Amino acid sequence: MRTSPRVHSYAPGLYLIVLAPPLTGFGDFMGIWFFEGPPRVLVDVGPAATTPQLLAALEEIGAKQIDYILLTHVHIDHAGGLAAIAAAFPQAPVVAHSRGRPHLADPARLWAGSLKTLGKTAEAYGPIAAVPAERLALAEDLVDSRIEAIYTPGHASHHVSYRLDDLLFAGEAGGVCLAVEGARDFLRPATPPRFRLQTALSSLDALIALDPGKICYSHFGLRADARGQLRAHRDQLLLWQQIVAEETPQHPKGQAEKACLQRLMREDHRLASFRHLPAGVRQREEGFLRNSLRGFIGEFEEKQARASEAE
């Protein structure tokens, strides 16, 4: 398994650092962005297990100084290695949403929740260490005219996207977009429980209204026509909602997932490239597809339960 980072230069001063955690099928999935700006920003840091890879890549790029470490959210695949990266760049404030900040200063609950939800994947990512509170800045209070922080809850309640120049660093607000050799891109939602569709749609609408030029996905890479990508993902979320609403009532509680997934694979053309993915990547993506589907089903069942109680 590859342990050294790969660095892709997409444009002058824009680098995608590809990290490889010790998990099958995760070799071309986890991207960290470094933008020379000004200002010089690092968008997310990856898990603790890949911190040596990230530090080696930043040295290769020649990133001796970073002005900001921008976190889209604090899930451990995005922020697990923060303590070591923050220590390596002590002058850089760490920017995160106020809802995520407490978990960075005291990550015990975040780590316990990650272990419960992700199991062996969390163990492979490695535990998250605490970051001194004085290093943490709030995205809501960021004062730098060159950076626009946009609150984009959906994938996580504390998710933030960032716009610099014509670049939109969207984290997972626009879903997951994977290049597939010989086929169209594979685009899927990143909507784990507890998911709220209207919240995610509002976030997408806010990003579309910015009219950004390019979108930088955490998973994975850069795409032109950011608005087109975001609109396609918005349509995808609405299709998933429709299929879940049609299929879930036809099955006993807890048994609709398989039927919904089968229909999505037939009817969501953005998933059509799934069959062309390498075996390890298909295994990874099937797990994420199911978890994203559970977010939709969970919200639907909650609404149904509230409607029943109101009768």
Image (cartoon, grey):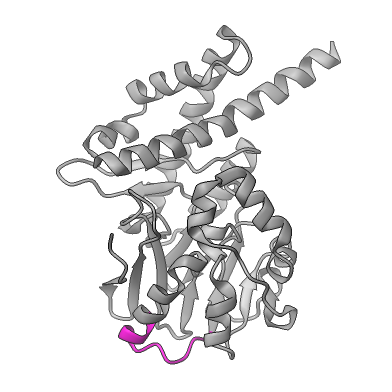
Magenta stretch, residue numbers: 58-67
64 is within the stretch colored magenta: yes
The C terminus is located in which quarter?
top right
Establish if 17 lies above or below 23.
Answer: below
Extreme residue in the top direction? 250
Establish if 1 lies above or below 309.
Answer: below
Extreme residue in the right direction? 310
Q: Main secondary structure of the magenta part?
A: loop
Give the total number of marks visible in the rendering.
0
* Image x and y of residue 270, in percent: 33, 35
Extreme residue in the left direction? 182
Task: Indicate the quadrant where residue 7 lies.
Answer: bottom left
Q: Tell whether 105 sits left or right of 279.
A: right
* Image x and y of residue 30, in percent: 40, 59
Residue 18 seen: yes
61 is within the stretch colored magenta: yes
Residue 166 seen: no
The residue shown at (43%, 41%) is: 233
| Front residue (pair 208, 173) | 173
* Image x and y of residue 161, in percent: 54, 61
Q: Tell whether 166 sits left or right of 141.
A: left
Establish if 21 lies above or below 141.
Answer: above
| Front residue (pair 55, 150) | 55
* Image x and y of residue 209, in percent: 52, 54
The residue shown at (71%, 67%) is: 101
The residue shown at (36%, 86%) is: 59
The N terminus is located in which quarter?
bottom left
